Image (cartoon, rainbow, N blue to C red):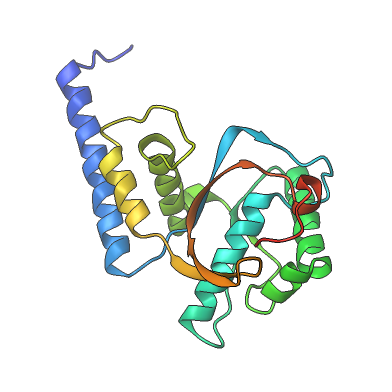
Amino acid sequence: MVEDVKFNELVAYGQAVLAFVRRVFEVVVRYNAKMFAGIVSVNARRNADGSFLRKDYAYLFERFYRYLEMVSTEEMGLVVFDELEKAQSRILLGQLEKYFLESEKGYQRSSRIVPEPFFVHSDLTTVVQIADLAAYCLNWGFRLKGMTEPTRPEIEPLARMVYDMKFVGTWFDEVGQQEKPLYGIFYTDDLRPKHERGETTGI
């Protein structure tokens, strides 16, 4: 038997969900948490060589590394992934191993980021559930330069809360010989590693 749910009951449920997520983010703000997110275009160009780590992961590790440097001279960071299908997890582990052991910047960042990630079930791990909520809100309620998809207006205030929690640091531009801002939330439309993009500099 299918229960006859009235429109005003659905509206009330939706409002309760929005209020719940807002409260979750308010608690996260109170503990001074920092948000890191790579927003990827659905049309982003992909790696030709599947053994290399995608650019959005490398950018996230760059920002996480800078954050750890700001927090403490000794603080180590852990990487936690929502568990994937085992074959996909092994592919990702191989990409991470190559990044942290064979690339210059990956090796440098392994001094502050433990290069062996943890895989957990998101529905059993509270912090990963919070990350899922943040990702959902950014996906539907926030746009950076170059992003043209429409948003859902009711999600926008929650997405703004997530964006306001972003990490803000700096990186040194060797070409321009100056420091530039580095934001924990970024957008990319190209996931290829530098050598596939024909680049020799950058982060």
Residue 135, horizontal then vertical, whole percent:
45, 45
Q: Is residue 172 visible?
A: yes
Question: How many numbered marks, from 0 up?
Answer: 0
Horizontal and vertical percent for residue 142?
38, 40
Identify the image quadrant of the N terminus. Answer: top left
Q: Is residue 162 left or right of residue 112?
A: left
In the rendered view, tell whether residue 42 sits above or below residue 127. above
Q: Which residue is outermost to the left? A: 8
Residue placed most toward the observer, 153 or 33: 153
Give me the residue at 19% from left, 25% from top. Answer: 11
Is 190 situated above or below 24?
Answer: above
Which quadrant, please, contains the C terminus? bottom right
Residue 110, relative to residue 54: is it above or below? below
Q: Is residue 119 visible?
A: no
Horizontal and vertical percent for residue 173? 60, 67
Image point (62%, 51%), residue name: 56
Please report the residue visible at 77 percent of the width from the left and 62 percent of the height from the top. Answer: 99
Q: Can you name the residue that lies furthest to the front here? A: 176
Task: Name above or below for residue 73 compared with residue 81.
Answer: below
The percent coordinates of residue 145 (x first, y second) are 45, 41
Question: Residue sitting at 55 percent across and 67 percent down?
Answer: 64
Q: Is residue 33 left or right of residue 65?
A: left
